[in-house]
Image (tube, rainbow, N blue to C red):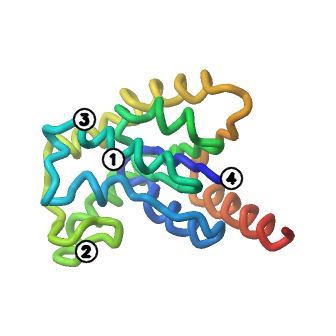
């Protein structure tokens, strides 16, 4: 594992998993939300600038890139040797989003940029609610079409996530 792409529904645990995987492997972690939500950038309207940022990250020697932003999936997946889809159920992800909104306030999530604060966003919650039935089939189809040379993991629950991390740590300790 030298180039790892982590995707999944909002609230699936991508950021936490990426931090733990980075600690286990020593690979640098890139949280796409950190850059995308920076107040000094205009990535919401300047898609070319966003794409250039992501392309500059995937050119690096090693990385774990966590986040959806499907406009750059093709480039990230082409460079990644490992793709991990955290496919947790909606009954778990939606409460996590509400906890994120209400329990951390005003503290920001560690992967978010300075000045960021959680705010309720109806469009985002609607996207998260519909993710399992609208986005998931697209993601699964994309993953199935990847070359067999890619290592693809679909982790469906906390046990599978933890077992994956334990296996990575054991593998790194044996080397």
Where is residue 37? Give x, y as percent.
21, 56
Label located before the other in sequence (4 or 2) = 4
Q: Are marks 3 and 4 in contact (CB under 8 Å)?
A: no
Look at 72% across and 62% down and name the residue there: 168
The mark total stands at: 4
* 174 shown above or below 119: below
In the displayed image of the protein, which residue is found farthest to the bottom? Answer: 107
Q: CA distance from mark 3 to mark 4?
A: 29 Å
**Left or right of residue 1: residue 57:** left
Would you name the residue on which mark 4 appears? 1
- Per the model, the C-alpha gap separating discs 4 and 1 is 22 Å
Q: Which residue is mark 2?
A: 104
Q: Residue at x 38, y 45 (%)?
A: 54
Which tag, 3 or 2, sits closer to the chain's start?
Answer: 3
Q: Secondary structure at mark 3?
A: helix
Q: Dot 3 corresponds to which residue?
A: 48
Name the residue located 22 percent from the left edge and 64 percent from the top edge: 101
- Give the side of residue 169 with respect to residue 64, left or right: right
Residue 128 horizontal/vertical position (percent): 30, 43
- Label 1: which residue? 53
């Amino acid at each position: 594992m030298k180039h790892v792409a982590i995707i999944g529904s909002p609230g699936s645990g991508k950021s936490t998993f990426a931090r733990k995987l980075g600690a286990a492997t020593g690979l640098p972690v890139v949280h796409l939300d950190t850059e995308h939500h920076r107040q000094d950038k205009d990535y919401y309207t300047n898609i070319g600038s966003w794409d250039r940022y992501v392309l500059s990250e995937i050119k690096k020697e090693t990385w774990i890139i966590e986040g959806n932003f499907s406009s750059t999936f093709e480039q990230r997946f082409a460079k990644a040797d490992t793709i991990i889809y955290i496919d947790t159920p909606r009954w778990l992800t939606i409460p996590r989003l509400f906890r994120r909104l209400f329990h951390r306030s005003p503290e920001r999530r560690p992967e978010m940029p300075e000045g960021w604060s959680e705010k309720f966003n109806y469009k985002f919650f609607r996207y998260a609610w519909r993710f399992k039935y609208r986005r998931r089939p697209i993601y699964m189809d994309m993953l199935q079409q990847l070359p067999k040379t890619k290592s693809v993991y679909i982790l469906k629950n906390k046990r599978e996530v933890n077992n994956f991390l334990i296996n990575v740590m054991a593998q790194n300790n044996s080397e």
